[in-house]
Image (cartoon, rainbow, N blue to C red):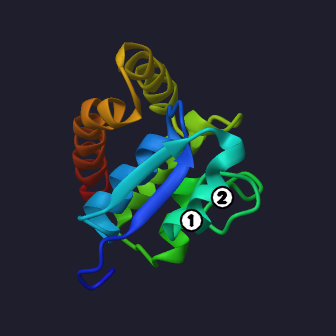
């Protein structure tokens, strides 16, 4: 946690899966007071430096894709999140954000994320619309892992 210090996080605009799933994860489990910046891809690192923001889901940063793993996985690893439901959710997010079908639910998430992106006026509206979807998926994953 950030111990009361407002943190800024920055990524590419035009978010679909990982760039909405990560802010949900940040707000729910890492930094409830987070501020999110969405900028053109070529500006992410410059804005990160200027705004003292943590860049994510861009090439070459700690909280980005690595091999078959997506940025959501990088956050789980970096912040040592061990909740079995989050790990289950990570497989759904990974499957929706990468070419490999990790979980059967991934295709539905991918379609919903694209639809939300298309009906949203901007990335912040997209987050507001999609966060309840991630809350529901997390509840689904909790029930699934609890048997």
Q: CA gap, disc 2 to disc 1? A: 6 Å
> Which residue is drawn at the image coordinates 50% and 64% (left, top)?
51
Does the rendering let one see residue 82? yes
> Which residue is drawn at the image coordinates 30% and 72% (left, top)?
6
Q: Residues within 10 Å of mark 1 (few under 14, many from 20)?
A: few
Secondary structure of residue under mark 1:
helix
Q: Disc 2 vs disc 1: Cβ atoms closer than 8 Å? A: yes
Which of 77 and 57 lies nearest the eye of the viewer? 57
Q: Residues within 10 Å of mark 2 (few under 14, many from 20)?
A: few
User: Where does the image place residue 124, in percent across and percent down from the top left?
Assistant: 34, 37
In the image, residue 99 sits, relative to residue 114, either above or below, namely: below
In the image, residue 68 sits, relative to residue 49, either above or below, namely: above
Residue situated furthest front in the rendering: 50
Q: Which quarter of the rendered picture does the N terminus lie within?
A: bottom left
Which of 87 and 34 lies nearest the eye of the viewer? 34
Q: In the image, is 133 to the left or to the right of 121?
A: left
User: Where does the image place residue 47, in percent across and percent down from the top left?
Assistant: 58, 57
> Which residue is drawn at the image coordinates 29% and 79% (left, top)?
5
| Disc marking residue 46 | 2
Quarter location, residue 26: bottom left
Quarter location, residue 66: bottom right
In the image, residue 52 sits, relative to residue 23, either above or below, namely: below
Write down the residue under mark 1.
50
Secondary structure of residue under mark 2:
helix
Q: In the image, is 49 to the left or to the right of 132?
A: right
Q: In the image, is 4 to the left or to the right of 11?
A: left
Does the rendering let one see residue 85? no
| Disc marking residue 141 | none
Q: Could you tell me how many numbered marks the image carries?
A: 2
Which of 48 and 106 lies nearest the eye of the viewer? 48
User: Where does the image place residue 93, in percent across and percent down from the top left?
Assistant: 50, 43
Q: In the image, is 14 to the left or to the right of 109?
A: right
């Amino acid at each position: 946690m950030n111990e009361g210090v407002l943190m800024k996080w920055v990524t590419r605009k035009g978010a679909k899966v990982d760039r909405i799933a990560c802010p949900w994860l940040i707000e729910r489990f890492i930094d409830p007071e987070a501020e999110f910046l969405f900028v053109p891809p070529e500006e992410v690192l410059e804005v990160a430096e200027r705004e003292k923001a943590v860049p994510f889901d861009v090439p070459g940063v700690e909280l980005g894709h690595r091999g078959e793993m997506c940025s959501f996985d990088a956050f789980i690893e970096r912040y040592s999140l061990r909740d079995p439901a989050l790990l289950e959710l990570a497989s759904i997010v990974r499957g929706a954000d990468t070419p490999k079908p990790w979980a059967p639910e991934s295709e539905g998430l991918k379609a919903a994320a694209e639809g939300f992106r298309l009906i949203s006026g901007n990335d912040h509206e997209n987050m507001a619309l999609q966060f309840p979807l991630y809350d529901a998926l997390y509840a689904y994953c909790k029930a699934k892992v609890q048997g």
